[in-house]
Image: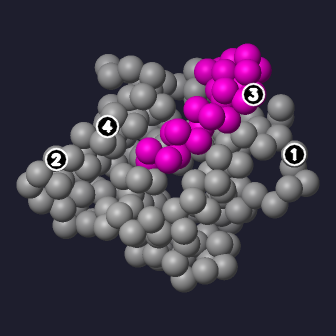
Amino acid sequence: MDYLTKKWKMWYKSLDVNHDGKISLEDVEESRNKFTELHHLLGDKADSVKTDMQNWWTTYILNGKDQEISEEQFISNLTTAYNKDKAAFKDQMQKCFDVMFDVIDTNKDRSIELNEFIFAFKAFGHENEELVTKAFKLFNNELVPLRDIVTAWVQFVTEEDSSKRDVVREAFESGV
């Protein structure tokens, strides 16, 4: 459980877009705005993406609309769900990342290229393109199928065996 907790703390920090030590609606707003600006989305497309991102945040991270969540609460929520039913937890995380990466895949080609990856990380407050590029290259491909990225993230938040390669953990440990 310690290994998972360590990774969940990394995930929490990655979701603290404005780096103020908590996840709140301010992080939601900043990530939505950055993402639509970076992709030059306008009008209905921008509104749709912003709505989808807010729904993801409130459904899978904040567990409600008008809430902020501390690292301790975040870890406690994940621990409770994981210990209650590991299979259900994994299913929930699969949905979580399916939804998020469907939003990030703005051109709907079911794959992620380097620029999309960089924009997604920038939207979550990770500005160092060199490190994000290094993280992308861990997938060993110029164009990464969406399912590979989703699978990697699901493994990151659900796999407690530290002997298995974990590219998302490697990316975080490299400084992303």
Q: What element carries label 4?
A: helix
Residue reaching furthest to the right: 163
* Residue 133, numbered label: none
Of tags 2 and 3, the one toward the viewer is 3
Q: Name the residue under label 2.
A: 47
Q: What residue type is labelled 2?
A: Asp
Quadrant for the C terminus, please: bottom right
Q: Which amino acid does label 3 sit on?
A: Lys
* Residue 54, numbered label: 4
> Which of the colour schemes (rainbow, by chain, secondary structure, one colour) is used?
one colour
Specify the segment rendered in magenta: 76-100
Residue 40 location (% of width, % of height): 19, 67
Q: Can residue 123 be seen in this view?
A: yes
Q: Quadrant of residue 6?
A: top right
Q: Distance between the residues labelled 2 and 1?
A: 40 Å
Residue 35 location (% of width, % of height): 30, 57
Residue reaching furthest to the left: 43
The crowding category of the residue bearing disc 2, from other C-alpha atoms within 10 Å (few below 14, some 14 to 19, many at least 20), is: some
Of residue 67 and residue 102, the one placed in the foreground of this image is 102
* Residue 161, numbered label: 1
How many numbered discs sit on the rendered protein?
Answer: 4
Q: In this view, does 104 lie to the left or right of 172?
A: left
Of tags 4 and 3, the one toward the viewer is 3
Q: Are marks 4 and 3 in contact (CB under 8 Å)?
A: no
Q: What residue type is labelled 1?
A: Asp
Q: What element carries label 1?
A: loop
Q: Is mark 3 on a helix, strand or loop?
A: helix
Q: Is the magenta stretch mostly helix, strand or loop?
A: helix
Quadrant for the N terminus, please: top right
Q: Does the magenta stretch include residue 77?
A: yes
